[in-house]
């Protein structure tokens, strides 16, 4: 015969341990969500900053993603290649003249694999 008091005590202790683990996991999740929110806000701020800087640049520069699609263009690029601002998301080779697309100088590699490039003049 099973002693119900002992069995109930074990079940109760196991439930308490599970509750403690669940509380710890919930706390960890809350901390991770806060960190993710902070980083998301930081990324949004940096994207806005990049857009503003590109708007000020008279140097013909583009941001190209890892698949060589145009992600952003400077004011200088818009002046040198009419219609480039409307071509965001398209491959650089489809928008730029061939010689220009083949001669892009990488200025900086950005997080996520995108690159800031300067167009030849």
Image (tube, rainbow, N blue to C red):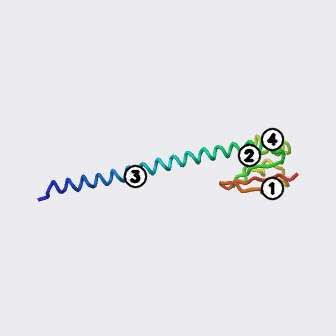
Which picture quadrant has residue 41?
Answer: top right
Q: Position of residue 106 (x, y in %)?
A: 77, 57
Which secondary structure lies at badge 4? loop
Instruction: State the CA–CA distance, disc 1 to disc 3.
Output: 51 Å
Residue bearing mark 1 = 104
Are discs 3 and 4 less than 8 Å apart at CB?
A: no
Q: Which mark is residue 72?
A: 2
**Mark count:** 4
Instruction: State the CA–CA distance, disc 2 to disc 3.
Output: 43 Å
Of marks 3 and 4, the one in the foreground: 3
Residue bearing mark 3 = 24
Instruction: State the CA–CA distance, disc 3 to disc 4.
Output: 54 Å
- Tell me if residue 84 comes above or below residue 107 in the rendering: above
Is residue 103 rendered to the left or right of residue 89? right
Q: Which mark is residue 83?
A: 4
- Tell me if residue 37 comes above or below residue 68 in the rendering: above
Which secondary structure lies at badge 2? strand
Which secondary structure lies at badge 1? loop
Q: Quadrant of the N terminus?
A: bottom left
């Amino acid at each position: 015969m099973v002693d119900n008091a002992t069995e109930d005590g074990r079940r109760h202790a196991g439930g308490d341990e599970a509750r403690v683990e669940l509380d710890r996991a919930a706390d960890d999740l809350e901390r991770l969500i806060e960190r993710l929110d902070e980083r998301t806000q930081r990324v949004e701020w940096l994207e806005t900053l990049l857009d503003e800087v590109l708007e000020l640049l008279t140097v013909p520069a583009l941001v190209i993603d890892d698949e060589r699609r145009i992600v952003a263009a400077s004011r200088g690029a818009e002046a040198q290649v009419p219609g480039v601002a409307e071509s965001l998301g398209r491959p650089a080779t489809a928008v730029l003249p061939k010689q220009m697309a083949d001669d892009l100088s990488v200025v900086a590699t950005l997080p996520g694999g995108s690159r800031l490039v300067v167009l030849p003049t």
